[in-house]
Image (cartoon, coloured by chain):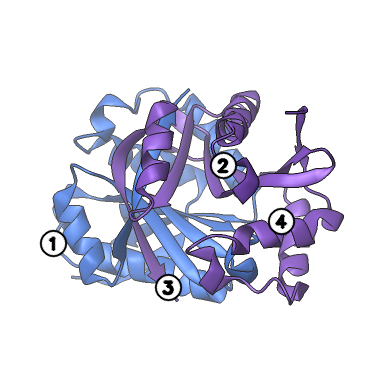
Chain colours: A blue, B purple
Amino acid sequence: MSDLDVRPAAITDLPAVVALLADDPLGAERESPDDLAPYRAAFRRLADDPNQHLVVAVRDAKVVGTLQLTVVPGLSRRGTVRSIIEGVRIHADERGSGLGTQLIQWAVDESRRQGCRLVQLTSDATRTDAHRFYERLGFTPSHVGFKLAL
Amino acid sequence: MSDLDVRPAAITDLPAVVALLADDPLGAERESPDDLAPYRAAFRRLADDPNQHLVVAVRDAKVVGTLQLTVVPGLSRRGTVRSIIEGVRIHADERGSGLGTQLIQWAVDESRRQGCRLVQLTSDATRTDAHRFYERLGFTPSHVGFKLAL
């Protein structure tokens, strides 16, 4: 396979990124790839925030993966800065190619560059394949993730 | 009991907040209440970030609780803004008083004011009392929380 480039997402990547978010068993019900307006507003807000890093993985000029890395300062653990990974998606053609590993490795490396001492993420309890994937990469499933929809 | 006030933490609250972080089975090993320098640096960074809300609960001029609310924009779920609750601590004298419920309710109300459609948090798998508490407040334990120390 040709080389992979992980770079900040541009507004022109938005249709491809939203298509990735929607091409997922859980995302299919939640996303609206035919109406990009809410995504454009969210993109601008992310682009204006220095603690937000929305990236795409590109191979042969095609967006094949995405994730969002958020840098979160905090008091606990002696003022530890942590990062949170959200919205990890890999194009169907690339699953099993090692791209997921490369994207998470990018996020871990970037977290280190940003001075983070902890990287965290939550994964839906039904995504058991994803859980094995994160454990192979050294993550510990030490927490329960709670959500409340408003 | 007299009235409770939930307000943004001030730098003068820092010793009391760090004492709360340290007065906890997990926090005892992680915090350094005798050396506030790293906490002061973290406090300034939080204060400069409009998406960060570090608050204290105060009763009779005494800090009896704290939490950190982070507002996180994102593309997924049609550009849903979510909030993340971290660092929830209740003074030992106040446990069972309903203060935890009031603090989380504050965080939920503030999340709504900030336009969030989702509130999330992770809780160490060993904190089973906390898990029951969050479920009573309507949170769903739908996710597994992974962490990687750097």
Which comes before the other along the chain, label 3 or label 4? 4
The residue carrying pointer 3 sits among few (fewer than 14), some (14 to 19) or many (20 or more) residues within 10 Å by Cα, namely few
Mark 3 vs 2, N-terminal side: 2
Q: Residue B20 occupies which quadrant of the picture?
A: bottom right
The residue mark sitting in front, 3 or 4, is 4
Q: Is residue B54 visible?
A: no
- Front of the two marks 1 and 2: 2
Residue at numbered disc 4: B17
Q: Residue at x 18, y 70 (%)?
A: A1
Residue A98, placed above or below residue B99: below
Question: In front here: B150 or B77?
Answer: B150
Q: Residues within 10 Å of mark 2 (few under 14, many from 20)?
A: few
Comparing B138 with B95, the one in front is B95
* Sequence-first disc among 4 and 2: 4
Q: Give x and y (percent) for residue A41.
A: 57, 32
Please give the residue where the numbered disc 1 appears in the rendered image.
A96
